[in-house]
């Protein structure tokens, strides 16, 4: 019970506060969008920039850690997409969007603060290792899959579709922050020393990122009222909250990951789908109701499922 009240509840109270404020109309939707835009386009990219710029790439980039997490993610996508086609009888574009909901964990907004509260600030290093390739890899994968599905019967080259997907991903603020962090990391290793004032500014922006994002997430979730599509929503919740962390946990044991790596990988895999999963569906205009409802329902259920996974970890 300690983990539920001391680790998980504070994070979801901030989300709930944002939900309450939006529900009571104490902030307009435009204001909430402004908070979320500040968090996603500026504060969170700076947080990722600073974390990756100071990450020990040699010590923290364990390929087996990434394999354990992303094997579970890609299996979740395959199962979600396949069940959507053959069980739910959805068109392939809908199925890919639903599969993306199963694929894309809320690794940054929820995964980082829950890991930090559970295990301390140093425990999030492996989280940032996972996050550093999360958006670039999964967005590229999802967009490429969708573009191929939509290009059926058209004379489009594989390279052209992949290049279009990669171009879109490289223009997102989070990815720009990640790439900037890698660039500064390499320059630092080559001898560049940034003044302390620079890092102080990075810390100031970073400290605002997660509270603002969690508050804004609550406000955004208020709009996504669950309605219909019960089977699809239940499927997304089971895959995201149970299958993905179970696969990651099993592979982590098989690969003999360290305690810190196991904690980061499993907690990140246990996160519900992020709002980006809905934005992906919105981008293509397919399965929007399933995506929005699954994000909301899974986020609420994750209070209990994350508690279970924390209790299963050393």
Image: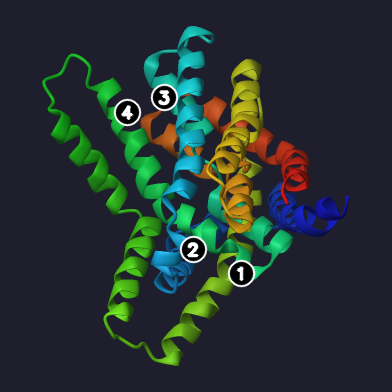
| Residue depicted at x 64% and y 64% | 211
Q: Nearer the viewer, residue 247 or 174?
A: 247
Q: Are marks 3 and 4 in contact (CB under 8 Å)?
A: yes
Image quarter of residue 304: top right
| Residue depicted at x 32% and y 41% | 140
Query: Which residue matches tag 3?
Result: 96
What mark, if any, has residue 122 been given in the picture?
1
Q: Looking at the image, is mark 1 or mark 4 nearer the viewer? A: 1
Of pointers 1 and 3, the one earlier in the residue sequence:
3
Of pointers 3 and 2, the one earlier in the residue sequence:
2
> What distance separates the C-alpha of mark 2 from that of mark 4?
27 Å
> What distance separates the C-alpha of mark 1 from that of mark 2?
18 Å
Q: Looking at the image, is mark 1 or mark 3 nearer the viewer? A: 1
> What distance separates the C-alpha of mark 1 from that of mark 4?
36 Å
Q: Residues within 10 Å of mark 1 (few under 14, many from 20)?
A: few
Q: Looking at the image, is mark 2 or mark 4 nearer the viewer? A: 4
Q: Residues within 10 Å of mark 2 (few under 14, many from 20)?
A: many
Apparent side of residue 74 relative to residue 212 in the rendered image (left or right): left
Q: Residues within 10 Å of mark 3 (few under 14, many from 20)?
A: many
Apparent side of residue 271 relative to residue 304 in the rendered image (left or right): left
Q: Identify the element where label 4 is drawn.
A: helix
Residue 166 screen position, x and y as percent:
25, 44
> What distance separates the C-alpha of mark 3 from that of mark 4?
7 Å
What mark, if any, has residue 145 been given in the picture?
4
| Residue depicted at x 59% and y 55% | 258
Q: Identify the element where label 2 is drawn.
A: helix
Residue 281 screen position, x and y as percent:
44, 32
Query: Which residue matches tag 2?
Result: 44
Apparent side of residue 115 relative to residue 154 in the rendered image (left or right): right
Of pointers 1 and 4, the one earlier in the residue sequence:
1
């Amino acid at each position: 019970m300690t983990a539920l009240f001391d680790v998980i509840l504070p994070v979801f109270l901030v989300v709930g506060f944002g939900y309450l404020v939006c529900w009571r109309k104490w902030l307009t939707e435009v204001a909430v969008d402004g908070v979320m835009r500040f968090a996603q386009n500026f504060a969170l990219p700076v947080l990722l920039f600073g974390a990756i710029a100071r990450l020990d790439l040699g010590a923290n980039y364990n390929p087996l850690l990434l394999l354990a997490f992303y094997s579970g993610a890609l299996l979740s996508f395959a199962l979600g997409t396949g069940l959507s086609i053959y069980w739910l009888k959805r068109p392939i574009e809908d199925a890919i969007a639903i599969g993306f909901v199963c694929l894309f964990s809320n690794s940054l907004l929820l995964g980082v603060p829950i890991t930090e509260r559970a295990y301390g600030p140093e425990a999030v290093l492996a989280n940032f290792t996972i996050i550093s390739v999360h958006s670039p890899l999964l967005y590229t994968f999802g967009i490429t899959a969708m573009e191929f599905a939509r290009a059926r019967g058209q004379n489009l080259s594989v390279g052209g579709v992949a290049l279009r997907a990669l171009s879109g991903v490289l223009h997102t603020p989070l990815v720009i922050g990640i790439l900037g962090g890698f660039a500064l990391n390499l320059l630092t290793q080559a001898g560049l020393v940034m003044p302390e004032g620079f890092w102080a500014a990075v810390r100031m922006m970073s400290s605002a990122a997660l509270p603002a994002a969690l508050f804004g997430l609550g406000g955004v979730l208020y709009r996504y009222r669950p309605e219909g599509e019960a089977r699809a929503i239940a499927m997304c919740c089971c895959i995201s909250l149970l299958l993905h962390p179970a696969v990651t946990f099993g592979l982590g044991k098989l690969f003999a990951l360290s305690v810190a790596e196991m904690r980061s990988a499993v907690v990140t895999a246990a996160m519900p789908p992020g709002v980006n999963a809905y934005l992906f569906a919105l981008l293509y205009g397919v399965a929007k109701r399933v995506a929005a409802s699954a994000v909301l329902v899974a986020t609420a259920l994750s209070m209990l499922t994350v508690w279970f996974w924390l209790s299963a970890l050393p």
